Image: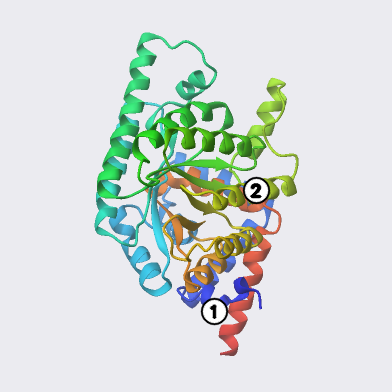
C-alpha cells in the first residue's frame, strides 16, 4: 500500500463536520470559474465593509489558517503536535504595505513569534517574507545594480538592521529562521543579504535559511555556487526548497519586457530540478534542508535519500513541510513514520489574510491533479467512516 493512501491517519484530527467542510471547499476550488467569481465577490464585500468576515472565518479561513493571533492558533498547534506529532510554523500572512510603519510592525511581530517559539517545542522555526521588512522596489533597484539615493541607502540600512536583529535573536534563542523567496526581479538583493547572514550566523549550524524556488531553471547553479562560497568561508547552508509560487506573473513579465523566462519550460523540468536540489543537499555535509513539498514522488525520494546517507528520520537537519489545510495525507503519514514534519500555519486578521487565501485557491485551481487528489482522499475517508 502507498504510504500516503492511509486516510485514517491523514484525517485523524478532523471531525466529521471538518471533513465535510474540506470536501466542500476542494470541490469549489476545483471549479475555476467559481474561484474567479468567489474571489471577485469576496474582494468587493471586504472593500464595501459588508459583514462577511464571519462567513469567511467559518469556511475558507479556518480551513487554511490557524487563527487571528498567535494565541488563537494554540489549540490547532497543540492538537497537531500532541495527537499527530506534527509541528507548526507560525506564518504572519498579512501582505506588506510599502511603508516603514508596516515594516516595523512585521519586524515586531516576528520578534514576538521568536519569543513565543522559545517556550513551545511544537514550533521549530520562524518565518518572514523579504517584502515584510522592506519595499519591493528597493530590493528591485539593488537587484538591478542601480545607484541608490542617500535616502534609499538609509532605508536599505534599516532593512538590513531588521534582518540582523531577527537572526541574532534567533541564534540566541536557538530558533532557526526561514526567509521566503519572492519574484525573480527582486530576489538577488534578498539572496546577497541572506548570504551575508549565513556567513555570520551559520558558523556552527544552519540558523538562517534562504528559499530556493525550483521552478526557476537557474537555481541549481545558484545552489552549487553558494556551496563553493560556504566551503571557502566555512559556514553551513540552510535552505527551504520549494517548487515556487509566482509562475504566471514571472512568465507574463518576461514576455512583456522581452527577456527569456526564468521559469522551467514545463512541469517535468520543474520536478526534475526540485529533485536535483534535494539530492545535491543530501549528498553534502554542512547543509540543512527544509523540503517544502506537496509532491508524493519527491517525498518518497527524500525518504530514500535519508536512508542511503544514514540520516536518521528525526535528524534536525531534515524537515518536510506542507501548508496547513493541504496534503494532510503526506504530513500525518510521514510524521507517523517518525520524520520531522511541520505545517505552515498562517495567521492574522481575516481581512488582511484574504490576499493569501485567494492565492491559495488560485494555486490549487492551477496545479493539475492537486485538488482532485485531495478530493479523492476525502471521499475515501468519508466512505471509510460511514462503513466503520
Where does the N terminus fall, quadrant-wise?
bottom right
Q: Give the secondary structure at mark 1.
A: helix
Where does the C terminus fall, quadrant-wise?
bottom right
Give the tally of numbered discs: 2
In front of the other: 107 or 40: 107
Q: Taking the image as drawn, is residue 323 in sight?
A: no
Give me the disc on residue 249. none
In front of the other: 311 or 26: 311
| 267 to 195, vertically: above or below | below
In the rendered image, residue 28, in percent from the top left (x then y), is placed at: 62, 59
Q: Residue shown at 39%/34% (left/top)?
A: 199
Q: Give the secondary structure at mark 2.
A: helix
| Left-right relation of 223 to 68 | right
Q: State which tag comes first along the sequence, 2 or 1.
A: 1
Is the residue under label 1 in contact with that under label 2 (CB below 8 Å)? Answer: no
| 260 to 87, vertically: above or below | above
| 112 to 193, vertically: above or below | below
Q: Residue shown at 60%/71% (left/top)?
A: 4
Would you name the residue on which mark 2 appears?
276
Q: Taking the image as drawn, is residue 72 in sight?
A: yes
In the rendered image, residue 137, in percent from the top left (x then y), is placed at: 48, 22
Q: Residues within 10 Å of mark 1 (few under 14, many from 20)?
A: some
Give me the disc on residue 8. 1
| Left-right relation of 24 to 104 | right
In front of the other: 282 or 66: 282
In the rendered image, residue 323, in percent from the top left (x then y), is placed at: 50, 56
In the rendered image, residue 324, in percent from the top left (x then y), is placed at: 48, 59
Image depth: mark 2 or mark 1 in front = 2
Q: Residue shown at 72%/48% (left/top)?
A: 267
In front of the other: 126 or 45: 126
Amino acid at each position: 500500500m502507498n504510504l500516503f493512501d492511509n486516510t485514517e491517519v491523514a484525517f485523524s484530527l478532523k471531525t466529521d463536520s471538518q471533513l465535510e467542510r474540506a470536501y466542500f471547499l476542494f470541490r469549489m476550488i476545483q471549479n475555476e470559474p467559481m474561484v474567479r467569481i468567489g474571489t471577485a465577490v469576496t474582494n468587493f464585500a471586504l472593500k464595501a465593509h459588508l459583514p462577511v468576515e464571519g462567513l469567511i472565518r467559518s469556511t475558507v479561513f479556518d480551513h487554511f489558517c490557524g487563527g487571528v493571533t498567535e494565541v488563537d492558533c494554540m489549540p490547532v498547534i497543540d492538537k497537531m503536535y500532541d495527537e499527530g506529532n506534527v509541528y507548526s510554523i507560525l506564518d504572519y500572512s498579512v501582505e506588506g504595505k510599502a511603508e516603514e510603519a508596516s515594516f516595523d510592525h512585521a519586524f515586531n511581530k516576528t520578534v514576538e513569534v521568536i519569543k513565543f517559539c522559545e517556550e513551545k517545542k511544537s514550533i521549530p522555526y520562524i518565518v518572514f517574507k523579504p517584502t515584510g521588512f522592506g519595499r519591493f522596489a528597493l530590493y528591485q533597484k539593488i537587484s538591478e545594480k542601480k545607484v541608490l539615493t542617500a535616502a534609499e541607502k538609509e532605508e536599505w540600512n534599516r532593512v538590513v538592521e531588521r534582518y540582523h536583529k531577527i537572526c541574532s535573536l534567533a541564534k540566541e534563542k536557538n530558533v532557526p529562521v526561514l526567509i521566503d523567496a519572492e519574484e525573480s526581479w527582486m530576489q538577488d538583493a534578498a539572496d546577497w543579504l541572506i548570504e551575508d547572514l549565513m556567513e555570520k550566523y551559520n558558523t556552527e549550524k544552519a540558523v538562517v535559511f534562504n528559499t530556493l524556488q525550483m521552478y526557476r531553471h537557474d537555481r541549481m547553479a545558484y545552489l552549487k555556487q553558494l556551496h563553493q562560497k560556504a566551503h571557502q568561508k566555512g559556514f553551513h547552508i540552510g535552505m527551504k526548497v520549494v517548487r515556487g509560487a509566482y509562475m504566471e506573473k514571472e512568465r507574463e513579465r518576461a514576455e512583456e519586457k522581452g527577456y527569456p523566462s526564468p521559469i522551467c519550460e514545463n512541469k517535468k523540468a520543474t520536478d526534475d530540478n526540485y529533485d536535483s536540489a534535494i539530492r545535491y543537499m543530501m549528498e553534502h555535509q554542512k547543509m540543512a534542508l527544509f523540503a517544502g513539498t506537496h509532491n508524493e514522488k519527491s517525498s518518497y525520494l527524500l525518504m530514500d535519500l535519508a536512508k542511503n546517507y544514514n540520516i536518521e528520520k528525526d535528524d534536525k537537519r531534515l524537515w518536510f513541510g506542507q501548508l496547513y489545510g493541504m496534503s494532510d495525507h503526506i504530513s500525518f503519514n510521514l510524521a507517523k513514520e517518525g520524520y520531522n514534519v511541520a505545517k505552515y500555519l498562517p495567521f492574522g486578521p481575516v481581512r488582511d489574510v484574504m490576499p493569501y487565501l485567494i492565492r491559495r485557491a488560485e494555486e490549487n485551481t492551477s496545479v493539475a491533479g492537486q485538488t482532485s487528489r485531495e478530493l479523492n482522499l476525502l471521499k475515501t475517508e468519508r466512505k471509510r467512516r460511514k462503513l466503520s
